[in-house]
Amino acid sequence: MEGAVPHQDPAAQTAGRHRGSTLVERAEYEQLLVAVRALHLDIARWAAEGPTRWGPWAAPFPIKEAEVSNRKRVERRTARMDQRTRERLPVLETFVRAAADHHAQQSARLQPLLAVPPGTTFTIGEAVFVRTKNATTAGARDEQGTLRHFGQAEHRAFWAWAAVEFLRHTGARIEEMLEISHHAMIQYWLPTTGEIVPLSQIAPSKTDQERVVLVSPELADVLATIIRRVRDPRTGAIPLLSAYDYEERVWNPPSPLLFQWDRGGERSRMSGEFIRSALGEVLAFIGLTDSTGHPLVFAPHDFRRLFITDAIRSGLPPHIAQVIAGHANINTTMGYHAIYPEETIEVHRAFITRRRALRPAEEYRTPTDAEWGDFLGHFERRKLSVGTCARAYGTTCIHEHACFSELAVCRGMASVVGRAQAARGRGVWLGWGGCVRLRWCRARLRHDIGVDHL
């Protein structure tokens, strides 16, 4: 602490910040910059109070205030979320069908195993398996002796399907889905018609506000399937579980949670990691990719963004969407509406239609074959005129602006030009012939005026 530390020059500071820039950029690296800048601010304040001890350690801030601007961070994060939604909304139905097909496939593979006693051979397609001798598990070994857990595969596929259906129909957060219980299913009598409407209570989570969402017929069918699966076959009741709340750091009272499973004879609540892993298996089953060829990963929170975006696009008032989603601020809900600026798109389309109506109709007719051929030939002749290499403007080109040594070769093009001109009457495309003729004329011009390049 006694020795003085030399100050780094700005070039060294910049090099230190950008070292390893070829790696993938951190998504939230601004938080690290804030910590470093705060440390330098503290040292500067300590140096002002105790210059003898902290003065040698004070240095200019290596991170500027603009680099830790929260506005830019929020804008980049919003742009990333909007891009995720734009990529996943068109393929949402495809992913939903893939989750159902994946579960149906795993369930069909499990049935032959359950139909034979332990230690017996069975087949799935052309593959031969031998069921393990443990009757309490649904496992088998293939011809290579590899153990296959058919029961676990069907179990993971089912809960992946259930999670996809629940999240896309409710727009709930993943922690709200994992805390949903059988007691959350309630009935509501409409005072005007007396009709019974099923509702589901969403427990308080992020905003500490409880809310109620309408249960659609599709969601009711999914919930009924989940309830049948988690019921105790001996008592017919859903087992009570006391789950740990990782956000509040407390144990919740025992309740009949719907998202629970039998793990080796012990009932346990599912975790977010299990749901994400199961969704990854659905993605591997269907093989969806984005525009860059990378897997199009569906995170649980993506279904919440897709639900709110689709609801607002379908005409649901934003303040109603805010209540359903449980947002504390309506600006958060309106952020989903900004993903597809439909008003801007429609006004722009109307402007294009009005502009086309003012132009002559002749400009929008279908071109003839001769006009189209001349259009394509224009670009080939332009390549010969300006060159196709990456030279700077105003400099010579070794490809298209050759010296006199090429004149002998160009003279051999005369016969080619003659054949191209003869083809004019036969309706042959003249773009290539025009290119050859242009090159021959340029070579003759260089020879006549006595310059080496032109």
Image (spheres, grey):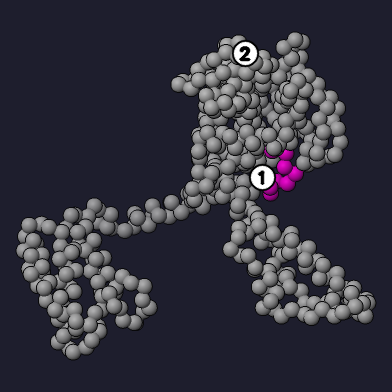
Q: Position of residue 327 (x, y in %)?
A: 72, 42
Q: CA distance from mark 1 to mark 2?
A: 55 Å
Q: Secondary structure at mark 2?
A: loop
Amino acid tagged 1: Thr
Q: Residue at x 25, y 84 (%)?
A: 453
Q: Is residue 414 left or right of residue 110?
A: left
Amino acid tagged 2: Pro
Q: Main secondary structure of the magenta part?
A: helix
Residue 330 belongs to the span the image colors magenta: yes
Q: Is residue 390 above or below residue 345?
A: below
The residue sitting at the bottom extreme is 450
Packing grade of label 1 (10 A; few <14, some 14-19, many >=20) is: many
Q: Is residue 31 left or right of residue 305?
A: right
User: Where residue 333 is drawn, which disc sits there?
Assistant: 1
User: Where residue 234 is drawn, which disc sits there?
Assistant: none
Q: Position of residue 430 (x, y in %)?
A: 15, 62
Q: Secondary structure at mark 1?
A: helix
Packing grade of label 2 (10 A; few <14, some 14-19, many >=20) is: some
Q: Residue at x 70, y 30 (%)?
A: 213
Quadrant for the C terminus in the image = bottom left
Q: Is residue 81 above or below residue 183?
A: below
Q: Which residues are magenta?
A: 323-333
